[in-house]
Amino acid sequence: MTKCVPYEVCGCGKRGFFDEHDAAKSLGRAQTKRDRAAQAWPTRRGMVRESRYYACPDSGLYHLTSESKQRKAAPMTNY
């Protein structure tokens, strides 16, 4: 039996959680799942791990992301 946090698919195609509590609970479950999967591999290189949740500007639902707030706020630079 899987314990699933209730969600609906947002208009942008991502899972949308109804409130911060559900988003935080899902974030914890996702991090645990990724950490367990990482233990089976010799290195974490290339593995994505969700680090926070944010409110969708279109729907108001909450989404999970692996992008940090600092990276999101940093201006794009072309090298």
Image (cartoon, helix red, strand yellow):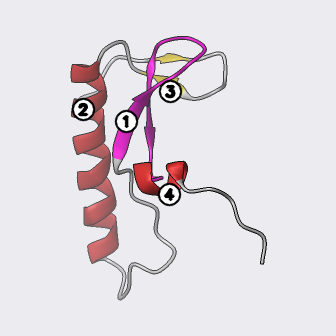
Of pointers 2 and 1, the one earlier in the residue sequence: 2
Task: Point out residue 66 in the picture as x, y percentages from the top left corner.
Answer: 45, 52
Circles 2 and 1, Cβ within 8 Å, touching? The answer is yes
The residue shown at (46%, 81%) is 45
Say which of 47 and 3 sits in front: 47
Determine crowd level at label 4: few under 14, some 14-19, many 20+ residues with C-alpha closer than 10 A: few
Residue underneath mark 3:
15
Q: CA distance from mark 2 to mark 3?
A: 13 Å
Residue 63 falls within the magenta-colored stretch: yes
Say which of 52 and 70 sits in front: 70
Circles 3 and 1, Cβ within 8 Å, touching? The answer is no
Determine crowd level at label 1: few under 14, some 14-19, many 20+ residues with C-alpha closer than 10 A: some
The residue shown at (36%, 81%) is 41
Q: Nearer the viewer, mark 3 or mark 1?
A: 1
Task: Point out residue 23 in the picture as x, y percentages from the top left corner.
Answer: 31, 27
Instruction: Give the extent of the magenta segment.
Output: 52-67
Residue underneath mark 4:
71
Q: Nearer the viewer, mark 3 or mark 4?
A: 4
Residue underneath mark 2:
24
Relative to 68, residue 38 above or below: below
Q: CA distance from mark 1 to mark 4?
A: 14 Å
Q: Nearer the viewer, mark 1 or mark 4?
A: 4
Circles 2 and 3, Cβ within 8 Å, touching? The answer is no
Q: Amino acid at mark 2?
A: Ala
Relative to 55, residue 64 above or below: below
Circles 1 and 4, Cβ within 8 Å, touching? The answer is no
Task: Point out residue 61 in the picture as x, y percentages from the top left corner.
Answer: 45, 16
Q: Does the image show residue 67?
A: yes
Numbered tag placed on residue 53 in the rendering: 1
